Amino acid sequence: VAVEGGCGEFVPADGSVCISLEADGEFGAFDAELKVPADAEHAVASLELLLVESDASTRRVSYAHLASAPLTLAEPRPPSATLELIAVDAAGRPRATFATFADNEPVRLRLRAATYTGTPVGGARVTLSWELTA
């Protein structure tokens, strides 16, 4: 649960966002929701967990770094993929060129869709259309 009033006296010097949380007394667990603005640009950032302790009598505040984790902010966009199209013979072996088909010979093609990082795209719907030119 986010505590009203932000982070008290703690203000990150770099202008980053800060929220205060209270952990439950039994397990020390908490949950939080961080909203990313719709106009956020692609960036690498980090999420840091600090323990803040304060002493009202001395007005001293101490901060202890507990953990951090990297995260990537990215603008939403459709998945990007590559499409490889290969002419193959009846046995499924690649043909040397698309230009050597005899009349009435079936055209056999192998399609491979993958993300730009090389991960195969399974179950994707692919529509293939072509035009014959003389």
Image (tube, grey):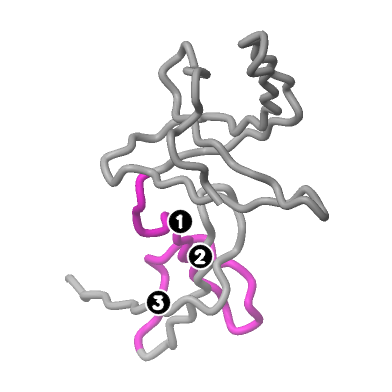
Separation of marks 2 and 1 at Cα, in angstroms: 6 Å
First to last magenta residue range: 75-103
Is 88 magenta? The answer is yes
| Mark 3 lies on residue | 126
Q: Residue at x 45, y 57 (%)?
A: 81
Q: Earlier in the sequence, mark 3 or mark 2?
A: 2
Q: Is residue 28 above or below residue 7?
A: below
Quadrant in which residue 43 is drawn: top left
> Which of the two residues, 5 or 45, is positioned nearer the viewer here?
5
Q: Residue furthest bottom?
A: 104
Residue 82: mark in rendering: 1
Q: Pointers 2 and 1 in contact (CB under 8 A)?
A: yes
Residue 116 - label: none
Mark 2 belongs to which amino acid?
Ala
- Residue type pointed to by label 1: Thr
Badge 3 amino acid: Val
Separation of residues labelled 3 and 1 (CA atoms)? 12 Å
Pointer 3 and pointer 2: residues touching (CB < 8 Å)?
yes
- Pinpoint residue 34: horizontal percent, then vertical percent: 47, 45
Residue at 52 percent across and 19 percent down: it is 10
Which residue in the structure is indicated by mark 2?
A: 113
Neighbours of disc 1 within 10 Å: few (<14), some (14-19), many (20+): some
